[in-house]
Amino acid sequence: MQGGSNPFLATLAGIVGEIHVLTDDADTARYVADWRRTYPGAARAVVRPGSTGEVARVVAACAAHGVAVVPQGGNTGLVGGSTPDASRSEVVLSLGRMAAIRRIDPLDNTITLEAGCTVLAAQQAAAEQNRLFALSLASEGSATIGGVLSTNAGGEQVLRYGNTRDLALGLEVVLADGRVLDALGGLRKDNTGYDLKHLFIGSEGTLGVVTTATFKLFSMPRSVVTGWMAVRDPQAAVEMLSRLTDAVGERVTAFELLGRGALSQVLSHPLAGMRDPLAGEYPWAVLFDVSEASAQLDPRAAVEAVLADAIDAGLVADAVIAESARQAHELWALRDHVPEAQRLHGPSIKHDISVAISRIPDFIEQAGAALEQRMPGIQVVCFGHVGDGNLHYNQSKPAGMSDEAFRAREDEIHDVVHAVTARLNGSISAEHGIGRLKQSAFLQYKSPVALDLMAGIKRALDPANLFNPGRVLPRDLVDPTSPSLR
Amino acid sequence: MQGGSNPFLATLAGIVGEIHVLTDDADTARYVADWRRTYPGAARAVVRPGSTGEVARVVAACAAHGVAVVPQGGNTGLVGGSTPDASRSEVVLSLGRMAAIRRIDPLDNTITLEAGCTVLAAQQAAAEQNRLFALSLASEGSATIGGVLSTNAGGEQVLRYGNTRDLALGLEVVLADGRVLDALGGLRKDNTGYDLKHLFIGSEGTLGVVTTATFKLFSMPRSVVTGWMAVRDPQAAVEMLSRLTDAVGERVTAFELLGRGALSQVLSHPLAGMRDPLAGEYPWAVLFDVSEASAQLDPRAAVEAVLADAIDAGLVADAVIAESARQAHELWALRDHVPEAQRLHGPSIKHDISVAISRIPDFIEQAGAALEQRMPGIQVVCFGHVGDGNLHYNQSKPAGMSDEAFRAREDEIHDVVHAVTARLNGSISAEHGIGRLKQSAFLQYKSPVALDLMAGIKRALDPANLFNPGRVLPRDLVDPTSPSLR
């Protein structure tokens, strides 16, 4: 730490220890820019408390000095919601040192984790007790419990187990005045007053700092049937989800759509061990998992019967079921490498939209047509979670266009996609949040009534706009003295 | 309607039609007292709007006239949260005319229901599409969608499908200023700002009036294994839940504990067709359902293996599995008749507590000992949802005590039970809510930090304390000019 003579920094050092107040640019570099480097920033300091009590005292000190607090977990967010702006006036509150697994109870089927614990560590701790921590996402080795709570992260098993908010049973939160809300009980049922937990989950660090949380655990699946099928079109994908669920119930754990544009990019780049699972070149594929908790029951025959019927009905052209864990892994690798392949392919424009499941075909048709009209030859990289109505609907440039020309039209492309989403009553951010990246679209498409309520809640819980100011809700919407945006 | 010359009532009649503004005592009788008749009240008027627009205009008129609004569904609540006080100054807003099933979509697996629709009607509409509306509770023939949302009702399938809040995907809400929040999208994923839905769910009509809601649907189970087992003690019940879940996963749909005191009352009263399922007289029983969505898979053998192992291990003394739907119905009838049997038995003092599942044995032991010490011979009627950590832990009077003497000590008994609950970090209202009945215990045991946050939210959303004033949060906690309770 530099600047020990600064009274504010000295106060912080007095709370967490001098070694945990970072001010040198070399030390703060990994905390001040987001993972995608869309928002390079600079912090007054990065503070790394080691306990809930220290977090509370740091927050109180920042409040007393009028210094904004930017809570940060693994810094894997995708919307610029957990890094400081360039003003060098904000304090980054990194929860990384609070990484303990406080308690795991197989009878309760619960686990209590500090905010800085990674998702992967939580999965491993649960697995040691033969339990499933049901959150699974690409960044799980770095993403932390505090981060996934703040963004209500989704991932690849939402269809069966829900979003992060559905998995959380209780929270401990440091509030803007430095008090601690202890709602960690881990109760499955508690109807005593308003549900405060759900207010903090998904609020992207703007209402409080989650320091610890209790989560549900589930039975560890004993077998998984992983399959890949070429579906006739997105409508057939939606119908196949319904047929599969009808046959095997809520065992359907993942149901991922991949357009040929996405698969082609994965297969055309030098990524290890990628091959098309089917002989023909089909426009749409679905990758699915059906998992089973019982050692005595095997849903494979039921899945095979669904596929056979669907082939007869013309919904599915061809399909394969993995014969080994290795084959299942190879199928999933195709899906998991889509973002990396698109990065290798060149610049990309990304969307994280959701619509009602039944509107997915309409969305794909209408958004594709609108994009082609606006930018002929634009390549659509469409993949995502059909069971959640959530598509990662991305674009690569048309052949012959320069990277710069394509990037220059990013906002225009966003507008086209978001307008179609809004027309279908969808969401412009299904699982990534708002942060700074999606704020203008958020303000454009969210109802004024909802925005008003959110601003009122923010003012009630954080009247000084201490926590993550300007993220999610713009400052002038929160400031009671500013004219409303309406 | 009487009093057409009253400008306020004339305004209401202008909105909903004169026939839907009830003021005669004979007409309002069924709306002004709660179902248990603990809180006889009187209303200025009962207003029955027929559309969201009418609700909004009624709320705006009440706000303009400074008249408090008490939203009401089927009036099956257990805590006095949906009926007017005795002042004859409040307006009851009955949602009963808004009972439409607006939309059901089997591909989305969603149903959109108006607030006055009953739970039973929702179940039936879903079943016609071969889908499950997963809420099931004793009052389902009368309880309405608005009511179960306002109390976050639980019921008998929470273990598998969750509470009401877990089933809701979207809401339409009339706010205190008469505006309408339309968040009915029915999206499975939507991370655009704070989650407003969860704030209204469980707020017992104090933050807004839910007019319509979209819910998840599930696969209809094709088979159910219903079993009854005599467990050694509550600890064995908890272990059996773990063993059963380990063997068959999240198929365990219900897992209900019954103490001998509860079963004895059911068997000792003239209720049709009740008989003990087992030959011996055991102190603790568990009734469970394991349901299966697939026609091709049958978990019965796996369940039987768990029971055989448990008998060998001494956890279970005897067990029976229903051989027919009729036998399953008979087993469930024993459970479902506990409240009725207790009513026939005499006065009862009731609790609806929850603790972490693993603490259930501690709770039963400690609460039982504390009660016996306070009132020797008091009879404990203990039954409930082990999988949710939720017990309906009720008491009947000791032999020889008069009804009046027993009732006079009700608060004292509540205090004993709630103190044990609090010591074990439990909830004094697991699924019934707070309303008026549990407000003093709520204020006693809820953390001051949580109460402060709730009061701040109430002030932000309903600054005039228009909706259900004094329920859940007392007036002086909400009124910014009153001294805080802290």
Image (cartoon, coloured by chain):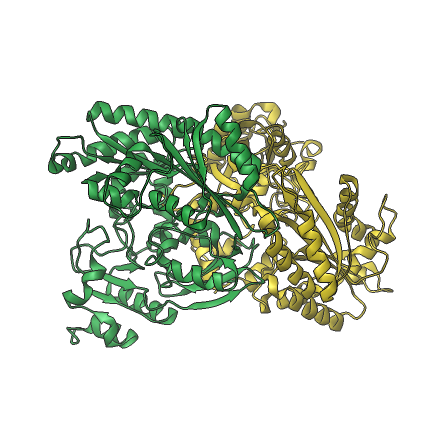
Chain colours: A green, B yellow
- The answer to which of B23 and B344 lies nearer the viewer is B344
- Residue A26 quadrant: bottom left
Figure check: A265 above or below A95: above
- The answer to which of B244 and A6 lies nearer the viewer is B244
Residue B415 pos. (x, y %):
66, 65
Side of B97 where B448 appears, left or right:
left
Side of A473 where A294 appears, left or right:
right
Residue A410 pos. (x, y %):
19, 36
- Residue A101 quadrant: bottom left
Figure check: A362 above or below B225: above
Side of A452 where B220 appears, left or right:
right
- The answer to which of B302 and A351 lies nearer the viewer is B302
Residue B56 pos. (x, y %):
47, 32
Tag count in the figure? 0
State which quarter of the image contains the N terminus of chain B: top right
Residue displayed at 43% across by 52% down = A135
Q: Is residue A183 visible?
A: no
- The answer to which of B333 and A465 lies nearer the viewer is B333
Residue B152 pos. (x, y %):
56, 46
Residue displayed at 70% across by 71% down = B370
- Residue A415 quadrant: top left
Q: Is residue A265 visible?
A: yes
Residue displayed at 68% across by 57% down = B306
